[in-house]
Image (cartoon, rainbow, N blue to C red):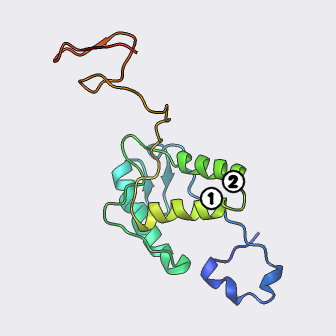
Amino acid sequence: MWRVSRPNAHLIEGRDAVHIRYVMGGLVKDIRAFHDNANDIGGDPERSNAQIARHWLEASARHVMPVRIEGFPLFTADTTSTYPQNIAFKAAEQTDSTLAPRYLRRIREASAAEARQTARRARPSRGPRSRTRCGAPTTRANSCSRTGATAIR
């Protein structure tokens, strides 16, 4: 199977007969155990971020997507995998296969062009919760040591 970057797709004759399918790339289980010797990527998350940013910047000449290398945070000490982004895309694809490519593009824009951390897990929403006077979530009998307040649900 061959691919054509999106900006060059207009050069294909009979492009109505060509089906473009977006695919994921860069699936890394744990950057600390990953090694791409050709691009000197892997091991330390911070060093890998710098190497990946430079690699993506070089590749941007072909795919024409802007890359922001300052503050590039794909990996951190707490987020060492790209699995969360890929799982999110597959979930979007199962939910709405027509919108999933736009979602994948948005993840790529946030990661590459905006240098945003995209691997953090969102905390599940449990709906609005009441809080004690000290800000702790309420439980059956939750006391706050500074104010002496007790909250009862």
- Nearest the viewer among 41 and 129 is 129
Secondary structure beneath disc 2? helix
Other residues around mark 2 within 10 Å, as few (<14) / some (14–19) / many (≥20): some
Residue at 83% x, 80% y: name it. 17
Look at label 1 and name its amino acid: Met
Where does the C terminus fall, quadrant-wise? top left
Judge whether 103 appears above or below 12 on screen: above
- In this view, 136 is above or below 57: above
Q: Which residue is mark 2?
A: 93
Q: Is residue 66 left or right of residue 131?
A: right
Q: Considering the numbered disc 1 on the image, is that residue within a helix, a strand or a loop?
A: loop
In this rendered view, identify the residue nearer to me: 131 or 96.
131
Q: Is residue 127 left or right of residue 90?
A: left
Residue 44: horizontal and vertical position, in percent?
Answer: 37, 48
Q: Which residue is mark 1?
A: 24
Residue drawn 45% across the image and 61% down it:
110
